[in-house]
Image: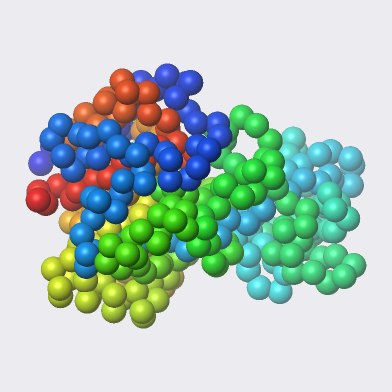
Amino acid sequence: MRSFTLSDFDFALPPELVAQHPAAERSASRLLDGTTSPPTDRIFRDLPSLLRAGDLLVFNDTQVVKARLFGEKPTGGRLELLVERVLSDGEVVCHMKVSKKPPVGTVLRMVGGFRATLLGRWPEKDGALFRLAFDSDDGADPYALMARHGHVPLPPYIAHADSEDDVRRYQTVFARAPGAVAAPTAALHFDEALLAQLDAAGVQRASVTLHVGAGTFQPVKTENIAEHVMHAERYEVPPATQQAIADCHARGGRVVAVGTTTVRTLESWAASGEASGDTRIFITPGFRFRHVDRLVTNFHLPKSTLMMLVSAFAGYEHVMALYAHAVRERYRFFSYGDAMLLARAGDA
């Protein structure tokens, strides 16, 4: 098999194709059908016609939290926190953006009037993230403090500050479990009307949870992709979803993963045998998929781990040709952009 390097996953993208705002309607985004030859340009609400009764759509039901918080050090220096995950007893793990890192024990004054005490690095003393304890006069927990005082953690390639529209649209209509700092963006295209159409067509639905971390935007810095260290994300595959997948395979249906986070969850479960935990799974060409037959996904950053995942799933040459088509046809890219439908390489 061919040996891939980071440069293999690069492509030229005109900056004006990076979507800064969502489509006026969720299901009005474009959908590139990569299961046909040549590929077919469609609208996302065409999806029910591309699936069959008995197929199983698996969604990631994570909920994006207002994880971006602002504050200042006792010296007056400004800082920004991005909460990566909530631990116990009011503790959180954060990325910190500040001119000079404060010492352990520093009490930070956060916008909104609550306090954050720096406890140390995470996961160890030389970890890249920071562990803090939040406290407020009313004893609110971290989720409540983020809901009151935080900002939607829009991706770095979206240039505007978060707005009320982002609060609504950078969230799926079925988000249930708070904990993500980035949306499972392929699922942003689904609205209640489209879900009703899928139900009427006999397409089944199930959910997993993967709390998307900021590491999803972390660039791969090594030309030898095998040297890249993946970030950890928490996942869970509920018993009902495990049964739904078994039933789908038994009846000859197809498991359709909505988004790369769903793929990572299902294949982490398949690889480890563990239905919950932390995953660092890194899917590159040559990976053997065990659960996923179809993939609904947005268009991803050049040289990203997600480009590698979709290339592993649908075939490198095919995916690069689809991206070239999408650029020519002026599809909208990344989180607020358009989507495509892929079949697993070698699948009919």
Q: Name the side, left or right, on which 162 lies relative to 117.
A: left
Which residue is pictured at 21% across the width and 29% down the height?
321
Residue 331 sits in which quadrant?
top left
The picture places residue 285, in percent across and down from the top left corner, at 21, 44
Q: Is residue 32 above or below residue 117?
A: above
Q: Is residue 274 above or below residue 79?
A: below
Q: Is residue 302 above or below residue 276?
A: above
Residue 328 in view in this figure: yes
Residue 213 in view in this figure: no
Q: Nearer the viewer, residue 290 or 258?
A: 258
Q: Is residue 57 above or below residue 188?
A: below
The picture places residue 319, in percent across and down from the top left corner, at 23, 36
The picture places residue 206, in percent across and down from the top left corner, at 36, 69
- The way the protein has been coloured in the rendering is rainbow
Q: Name the side, left or right, on which 246 lies relative to 280.
A: left
Which residue is pictured at 45% across the width and 36% down the height?
337
Q: Nearer the viewer, residue 5 or 104?
A: 5
Q: Name the side, left or right, on which 325 lies relative to 299.
A: left
Indicate the quadrant containing the N terminus: top left, top right, bottom left or bottom right: top left
The picture places residue 242, in percent across and down from the top left corner, at 31, 76
Q: Name the side, left or right, on which 64 lies relative to 299.
A: right
Which residue is pictured at 37% across the width and 23% down the height?
330
Which residue is pictured at 63% across the width and 65% down the height?
86
Residue 135 sits in which quadrant?
bottom right
Q: How many marks?
A: 0
